[in-house]
Amino acid sequence: MSGASTHYDRAGLANAIGAHVFWGSMPLYLQLVHTVPAVEYVAWRILFTIPLCLAIIAWRRAWPEIQVALRDRKTMLTLLASSTLIGVNWFLYVWAIQTGHVYAASLGYYILPLTMMLLGLVVLGEKLTRWQWRAIGLASVGVAILAAGALSTLWLSLSMATTFGLYGLLRKKVKAGPLVGLTLEALILAPLSLALTWWYAQSAAGSALAQGPLVAFAVVMGGPMTAFPLIMFAFAARRLPYTVIGFLQFSSPTIVFLLGLLVFGEDLKPAQLGCFVMIWAAAAVFLWDVFHNARRPKPVAPVA
């Protein structure tokens, strides 16, 4: 569609790419906590996100923004829904990596861009350029090839894509900034997280924090590993069309795929290779169109 908007916020683009590169590298970090149950790790991840977010809010003196959000019933209900979605998504991702389903996680985040772009087109009424439609066609063929060869774990991939796609849509529409929104989401999930960490501490295996200094440090680092990319993503979601953010999401599963192949030693099947070739070609076309149009000067509105 040639009538699509072709001018994109550069700061939004940079934050979107940075967040996805961050997420794509997560399997390396998750190897440090592979002995921690997925549910317990996600609970600690939420709890250690809170003090970091509160410290940044105090530094920025953003308490009034927190108060405004707390007084808005619609905002809080939206954040309740988004916090539930991101909590489920984190659990599925950590569980997939810990149980050796690296490619299933990769496929989930390859399906995610298509989910996000569909939401952008249908729910938000966004438009795409002709070249972007061609890129989506290439990517769709690639994802279909990969999905056909991974039917046994397709439920996992679809669940990951759906939960994060809906999460991003809610964060784009909610009346709360990136930092404030993440802080309130973590606070909403805190009571359940505290209960889970207490339950694990009382179990025979004990708390993850008692597994040794390296594991404890890695668990604590779950806070910044969670906060920074989510803040970047939420910032980008408010500055860019959701369809563009969706396509940029192809970068993180590509990194996950390369890690699965080069670091974790998973076998590469012909269907996977065909999928990734198609998606890389699509990504090259889409990104060329995005950055080409981003460099164009914005038209100046005539003075009445």
Image: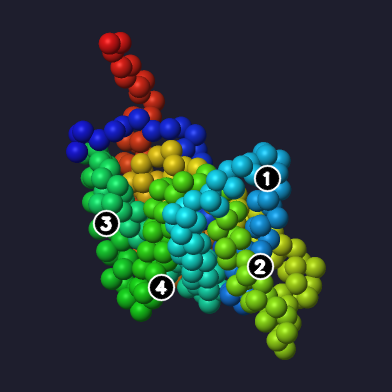
From the image, state whether disc 3 or disc 2 is nearer to you: 2
Between the C-alphas of marks 2 and 4, the distance is: 23 Å
Q: Nearer the N terminus, badge 3 or badge 4?
A: 3
Q: Residues within 10 Å of mark 3 (few under 14, many from 20)?
A: many
Numbered mark located on residue 282 in the image: none
From the image, state whether disc 1 or disc 4 is nearer to you: 1
Q: Which residue is mark 4?
A: 156
Q: Which residue is mark 1?
A: 56
Percent of width and height locating residue 95? 53, 74
In the rendered structure, which amino acid carries the disc numbered 1?
Answer: Ile
Numbered mark located on residue 140 in the image: 3
Circles 1 and 4 in contact, beta carbons < 8 Å: no
Q: How is the image coloured?
A: rainbow
Residue sitting at x 69%, y 65%:
219
In the rendered structure, which amino acid carries the disc numbered 4?
Answer: Leu
Q: Which residue is mark 2?
A: 44
Between the C-alphas of marks 1 and 3, the distance is: 40 Å
